[in-house]
Amino acid sequence: MSETGSRYYGRDMIFDRKSNTLIVKSHAVIESGIKVNSGVILGRNVNIWGGIITSGDIISGRGCNFRGDIEGRNVIIGAHSILRNIIASEDVKLLDYCRAGKLKAGKDVYLRRGVFVEGVEAEGNIIVDGNVRIGEYRAGKKVIAIRT
């Protein structure tokens, strides 16, 4: 993948220089990992066979599949996604019915209903909204359960 022009980054990816964001189109299959110094936005049902390493925020649509680790500042994963591990310098949010390995956040971790996580480590709070399954957890401050 080579950048040719101001916005084109590949067949399934567009780099927007104005917002300094890499945008991956819906239903894309990325055979390698992504390593950029910008934000990353993923469409719906994206399959990434490697990991994502970025200094910015990562936002994914629903139904994404990650076979590698995810590292970023703030990470928001859409509903029904499957992933391995997340390391975030700030917050992690997993939306409904995600399946994940271990999560490590510099601040808070927010888990929605139906999420299954092997382990959570947060320097701040772990906020649980609905019925969530967590293998191991360690919160720097509190574990907050919200009943919905």
Image: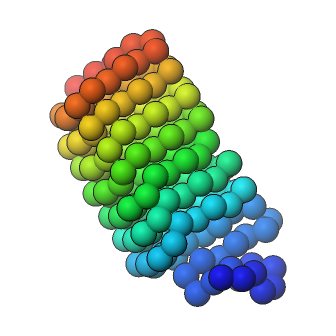
| Image-quadrant location for residue 147 | top left
Residue at image position (32%, 44%) is 101
Q: Is residue 99 above or below residue 113?
A: below
The residue depicted at 47 percent of the width and 76 percent of the height is 31
Q: Is residue 82 left or right of residue 31?
A: left
Residue 133 located left or right of residue 46: left
Q: What residue do we see at 28% from left, 39% from top?
A: 117
Residue 38 picture location, percent across and down:
70, 57
Q: What is the x, y in percent for residue 67?
A: 38, 62
Q: Position of residue 23 (x, y in %)?
A: 60, 69
* Quadrant of the frame with the N terminus: bottom right
Picture coordinates of residue 78 (x, y %)? 39, 55
Relative to 48, 106 lies left or right = right
Task: Give the answer, above or below, for where 113 lies relative to 120.
Answer: below
Seen from the viewer's position, the closer of residues 17 and 3 is 3
Q: Is residue 95 visible?
A: no
